[in-house]
Structure formats: C-alpha cells, structure tokens
Amino acid sequence: MSSTFRLEPEVGLHPDQGRVRLRTLVFIRWMAICGQTAALLIAHFGLGLELPLVAAFLVVLTSGVLNIAQVATRPASSWLRNKEATMALAFDLIQISVLLSLTGGLTNPFSILILGPVTVSASILTRRSTICLSILAIVAVTADVFFYLPLPWPEGSFFLHSLYLYGLWAALVFTAIFLAVYVSSLTEEARSMGMALVASQMALAREQKLSALGGLAAAAAHELGSPLGTMLVVAKEMKEELPPDDIYLPDVELLISEIIRCREILQNLAAWPEEDGGDPYNFMPIQSLVEAAVAPYEKLDIQTVIEAKSRDDSGEGTSIEHPMVERSPEILHSLGLFAQNAIQFAKEKVDISLVWDKRTITLTIHDDGPGFDPQVLGRLGDPLLSNREHAQKAVVQKNLDRRKEEDGDHMGLGVFIATTLLSHTGGKVTYSNHEVGGAVVNIVWPRHRLEVATQPV
C-alpha cells in the first residue's frame, strides 16, 4: 500500500488558485499612500524637518500609479494568484524601503512598516512566497542601514548610536525570519486543515448522494411498475384480437417484449439498493458492509480474502452474535479508499480480517505490497503531507514502479479523510508495516458505537 493516498483534485483545492482579491491589496495600498503622504506633510510642515519632498512624493506616486493601472486593466473583484500577489507585495516592500532611505533609514520611527508586506504574505500566501519576501526584506533593511539620508533633527536634540542601529537591524531581520518560518507555518497548517476538511465533506456528500440515488431508484421502480403492468395487459389483449396474418402483429409483439424488458430493468433497480445497502433505513451484518465497500475495487489479478469471525474476551473462538450495523457512507467511503490502495499496490493478495467480541469490532487490512515508508509512517494522517514535504516526493518516486496504473499527483488527503470520517463513527485507525512485509491498516470500533438493535418489520 502506498504511503500516501490519492484524492482527485477538486475545484478550489489547487494550491496556485487565487488567494487574495485585487480589491483588498488595492485598498491596503491606498491606505498606505494616505498614511505616507500625511507623515511626510506633518514631518515637513508641522515639525519643521527639511525632507526631500519631491523625491519622496515621487516614490509615493509610483504606488498610486500602480493602483490605478491594476484597477484599469482588470476587475477589482478578480483574484490574484500566488505569484501575482507576491510580486505586488514585493513592489510595496521595495517602495517602503526606498521611502525610508530618503527619510532617515532605520532611524525613521516608521521603519517597522517595512515588515508589513511580509506579515500580509505570511497570512495569505504560501510559505515559499513568504520566505522570498522575508529575504527581500532583510536585503532592504540592510541597505537602509548603510544607504540613507539622515533625518534633519534639530542640532544637539537627538542622537542614535550606531550600536542601536545595528540592534534595530538585527531585530527587524529576526522578525522577518520569525514571520517566514513560524507564522507562515501556522497559517499553512490551518489552510491545509481547512482544505482537507472541505475535501472530506465533498467525499461524504458524494457517498450520501449515491445512497439517496439508490432509494430514488427503488421508488421509481415501484411507481412505474403499475403503469407498465397495465400496458402489458392491454398489449396482450390486442395481440389476441389480431389475426395471425395481420401486418401490425409484429409491432404488437415487439411492444410486449419491450414492456417486459422495462419491467425487468425496474426490478433490477429496485433490488440493487437492497443488495448494496442503498436504503438508508436498511440494516446489515458488519461483514456485508465490509464486502459492499471492498467489492467495487476488486481485481481479477489480485486475490482479496475477507475473513470474519467472533471471539470472546479471552481470545478463544466463540459464537458471539454477528453485529448488525447501519449502512454508513463514512465507513463505506473510508474502507473503500483503504481497499482501493491495498489492492492497487498489492503484488498478489490482500487479506481483510474482521473480528468482533462483546466490546469491540476490529478490522485489519493487510497487503503484500511495498508497505509504508518508515520516514512518513508516524505522520500518516496529516493533510497535504506529500505536497508539503520534499522527502515525500522521493517516496512517491520510489513507489512509481509498483503502480498498476497512473493515477496522477497525490495530495495526501486520502488517509486524512478516511481517518477523520472513521473517527466520527468511533473508530481508531493505526498504520504499520507487517513483519513479513506489506502495509497494515487496523481499525477498532467500540461495538456499542456501531451496533444497532434490529427492528421487527
């Protein structure tokens, strides 16, 4: 079994899709322009500091021109992709750095604002973008230490020692690193968890729709049965009244055969939900539920063996009553995902063992494939594991030769979805490698969480 599980990409889950609206960045930039303009005017005319206003206002003007150009070339409600947003924040960072170099460098009380674009990136963009912006911020802060126009403080009224400037530089650098590493990691983790939860909800909704479709098919078969029966009776009466050489007799016989065929199709539709548990009020033995989950993924070249037995608390085999459970979309989807991966990566055989006693129900899936990679075995269940860890890419590449079919890029969401859905049913999932080889997925439920009392019909 693979160390990552596959989930087909869904709309809205692609990592490079829009992360921030253009309107938001434009609004933030207009606020920055207003703040920068007010600070320059107050410092020059209110405090009497002789600042290079022409050069400073030209720098501020570039932000205004960029805002106008962006709004004019695309709708303000459009979403900026990760690369576009990164470039926009990089421009803002450089603009602030140049403005600081004209107004005192790090001696300017507003020098902390150079970390604003990095903070915005850490909250909405990818970790790679945040790291790039942090490096750019460190370069800009370093440049502002050595290349800047001093603020024209009144003579003798204010002095900053060079040691303080170096300390301020170090503080800004370490803050940029902190934002790039710690804050962006927390944001990325929260974003991954949110995306994974959305994906699990989509998977569960699809399973529930399939269950509802089975009940709808049974209802349609029941409702259409009566009119088809009436049509069949009328057609047979017409056939009896027609002479043997009548030109319409073949058409009537064809009509009768097609009506009979329709009745057979409807009977099959009505029987399918009952056989597969499509009726949401249908109860079944736990073994039947496992078989229904595994059946769609069985292959002729892979032997799938399902064994079910009971045991008492001492471990000795006894005749404990077979647990009756309700058909659960969560369990069907999760067990189907585990079975699909086990069968896909097995060499010849997949063993599925179902054991129950008076307190627990245990299901074990063991394949004879390559097994889980030890590097990620302890972290199975993290959303987007394969996309977020470079080491996982090597694991995926290592197992490519064992794949039976090409199934696209792994997002690492499958195992997270299965674990989450099964935990909602009371199940505890553990992953390990068997001592003789192959991956093992073990699921344990408290019996009282799954078992339902059978109701008389």
Image (spheres, rainbow, N blue to C red):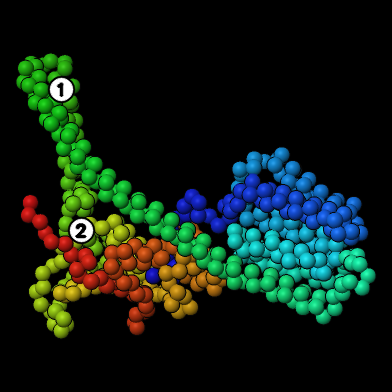
Residue under circle 1? 252
Quadrant of res 269: top left
Residue in view at x 37 percent, y 65 percent:
420
Residue 133 screen position, x and y as percent:
70, 64
Q: Amino acid at mark 1?
A: Val
Q: Label 1's element?
A: helix
Residue in view at x 49 percent, y 50 percent:
11
**Residue 326, label in figure:** 2
Left or right: residue 278 compared with residue 126: left
Name the outermost residue toward the right. 155
Residue in view at x 17 percent, y 53 percent:
282
Left or right: residue 125 compared with residue 365: right
For the residues labelled 2 and 1, the Cα–Cα distance comes to 46 Å
Crowd tier of the residue under label 1, counting other residues whose Cα lies within 10 Å: few below 14, some 14–19, many 20 or above: some
Q: Amino acid at mark 2?
A: Glu
**Relative depth, front residue between 13 and 4:** 13
Residue 290 visible in the picture: yes
Residue 244 screen position, x and y as percent:
8, 18
Image quarter (top left, top right, bottom left or bottom right) of the N terminus = bottom left
